[in-house]
Amino acid sequence: MDGMRQRRIPAPLTRTLVIRLTMRVSTRSWTQQDGWDQPLPASAATSADRLLVLACCDPRADSRPAIDDLLASYPGAAVLACSTAGSICGGQVSDVAASVSIVEFRTATVTAAMVRLSDPRESRATGQRLARILLGSENERPAAVLVISDGLIVNGSDLVTGMAEVLPDEVPISGGLAGDGPDFERTWVSLGSERVHDGVLGIALRGQGLRVGHGSEGGWQGFGPHRRITASQGSTLLELDGKPALDIYRDYLGEFAAELPSSALLFPLRIISPDGDVSLVRTVLSVDAEQHSMRFAGDVPQGWRAQLMRTSFDRLLDGAGRAAQESVRQVPSPTWALAVSCVGRRLVLGDRSDEEAEICLDVLGEGVTLHGFYSYGEIAPVDGYSGLHNQTMTLTTLSEGPA
């Protein structure tokens, strides 16, 4: 991709698609000044458990009236919402108060639940508890599980580990962590009318006709020396090569150090297992100036190696394209694509953030509705293993055919 790349004309913020008389996906947006951009569509679903409504909300706006409208329009449906670092809808990225997908399945069913946690150390047990609820008493295997969590309290990698320990091996887990713009102060999720700052949402999708694909790619490149993680506690990084982690980060960030933790989004950390078989990217959630430590969205295990990372516009856009290619390889003609991208990517791309969504649309093809949000962490299976990722564009694609 170069500067002469012809820009795709962004898709309209609102569109309604009916594909092969199976799934129907509609998108709407809501603002405090003008309300809904179009009337909410009437549901043709035969029962409420065939409806999934997802609202991606600007944390600075009061989106409760929009949620109330959704609850009144779709009684009994799974109506979920979360705070974000920006909404993705079609080929556009915005900070609209509420951006909504209304997904109607023809035969597939939706089960939604919310659990709460008060401490990162509860994350694994919380994941186990949520997975048991989603499985139900009959332990009926879902085709896929979506999860949207608090973005600041949770240890995302422990959460997914706990869920994977309970769910059958073949059930993919994907989703992301709620955002708070670049502020890292408070995130929220809601199910129905209950909105909390310490919750985890889970959605189990069941149906023999469901086809689910995933793609997750970054586009970041390591720089500087490899250092060993010599002291850590879960997701809290204490020391690199025996030196306080925050001090090392401040030295590298230079003029950006005063803007921590948000400026660390421009320089995530790659961690590499001792045998070199596993490489993950971690995003900073908070810093502790007194302890000279940093807390990340997922585990930073002691004994692993670590290296700072940076990127460019083209690398990020190429990464988004590769994520879409992988999801299309798994589901060639998706109807709905849930996009979860990292807030760090949006900060780097700036005014070019739309291009990330446009590239995904170009690859996904005609007939797909792209919707989602910028997050504090992305969840998706890679190489068959569901886990937490940072600084990626992650796609979950769905289509529904005959059972």
Image (cartoon, rainbow, N blue to C red):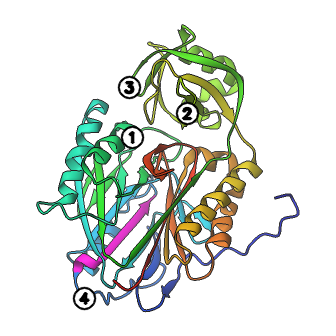
Q: Residue placed at 20% from the left, 65% from the top?
A: 140
Q: Residue placed at 28% from the left, 54% from the top?
A: 168
In this rendering, the label closer to the viewer, 2 or 4: 2
Q: Position of residue 104 (x, y in %)?
A: 35, 81
Sequence-earlier tag: 1 or 2: 1
Report the magenta residues as a range. 48-57
In this rendering, the label closer to the viewer, 3 or 2: 2
Mark 4 to mark 3 CA distance (whole Å): 46 Å
The reply to whether dot 4 and dot 1 touch (C-beta < 8 Å) is: no
Mark 1 to mark 2 CA distance (whole Å): 21 Å
Query: How many tags in the picture?
Result: 4
Q: Is residue 356 visible?
A: yes
Mark 4 to mark 1 CA distance (whole Å): 35 Å
Q: Which mark is residue 234?
A: 3
Left or right: where does residue 306 sit relative to residue 234? Answer: right
Q: Which mark is residue 156?
A: 1
Q: Dot 4 corresponds to which residue? A: 46
Return the residue nearer the eye: 398 or 250: 398
Left or right: where does residue 338 sit relative to residue 223? Answer: left
Mark 3 residue crowding within 10 angstroms, few (<14) / some (14–19) / many (20+): some
**Mark 2: which amino acid?**
Asp
Q: Position of residue 166 (x, y in %)?
A: 24, 48
96 is higher (above) or lower (below) than 265? below
Q: Dot 2 corresponds to which residue? A: 277
Sequence-earlier tag: 4 or 1: 4
Q: Position of residue 299 (x, y in %)?
A: 43, 30
In this rendering, the label closer to the viewer, 1 or 2: 2
* Disc 3, SS: loop
The reply to whether dot 4 and dot 3 touch (C-beta < 8 Å) is: no
Mark 4 residue crowding within 10 angstroms, few (<14) / some (14–19) / many (20+): few
**Mark 3: which amino acid?**
Gly
